[in-house]
Image (cartoon, grey):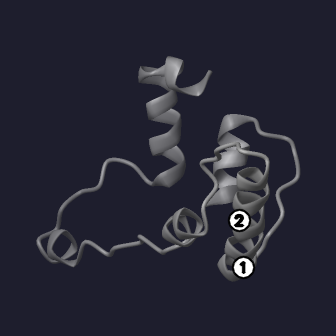
């Protein structure tokens, strides 16, 4: 999904692949570092773990009832970008 989104949105920078555990560990220290200097950050280990939780739900009911899906992931991004370009600025 990341590679498809990068391709469709023209994102050229490299992306690193890391485990959610490692990212949550880093987020813990980032959060503590900000607190140390009296600052706030939106980076939080719980948010990292929540973002890393898989949400790929298979719509079995729709599949069983021959629902015709209009878009796959890549074409959904393309369509979204065409109808709401302001979301991508």
Q: For the residues carrying marks 2 and 1, which lies nearer the camera in this image? A: 2
> Residue farthest to the top?
86
Answer few, some or many: residues within 10 Å of disc 1's Cα (few below 14, many 20 plus, some between 14 and 19): few
**In the rendered view, does 60 fall on the left or right side of 46?**
left
Tell me residue 55's x, y (percent).
Answer: 41, 70
Tell me residue 46's x, y (percent).
Answer: 53, 69
Residue under the image location 48 percent in, 23 percent down: 82
Residue under the image location 45 percent in, 33 percent down: 79
Where, quadrant-wise, is the C terminus in this rendering?
top right
Residue under pointer 1: 19
**In the rendered view, does 57 fall on the left or right side of 63?**
right
Residue under the image location 66 percent in, 76 percent down: 20
Residue under pointer 2: 27
Tell me residue 15's x, y (percent).
Answer: 82, 57
Where, quadrant-wise, is the N terminus in this rendering?
bottom right
Q: Earlier in the sequence, mark 2 or mark 1?
A: 1
**In the rendered view, does 30 fall on the left or right side of 59?**
right
Q: Give the structural element (helix, strand or loop) at label 1.
A: loop
């Amino acid at each position: 999904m990341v590679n498809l989104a990068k391709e469709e949105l023209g994102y050229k920078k490299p992306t690193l692949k890391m485990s959610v555990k490692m990212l949550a560990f880093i987020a813990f220290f980032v959060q503590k570092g900000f607190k140390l200097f009296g600052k706030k950050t939106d980076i939080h280990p719980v948010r990292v773990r929540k973002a890393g939780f898989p949400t790929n739900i298979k719509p079995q009911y729709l599949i069983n009832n021959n629902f015709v899906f209009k878009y796959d992931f890549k074409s959904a991004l393309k369509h979204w970008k065409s109808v709401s370009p302001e979301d991508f600025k």
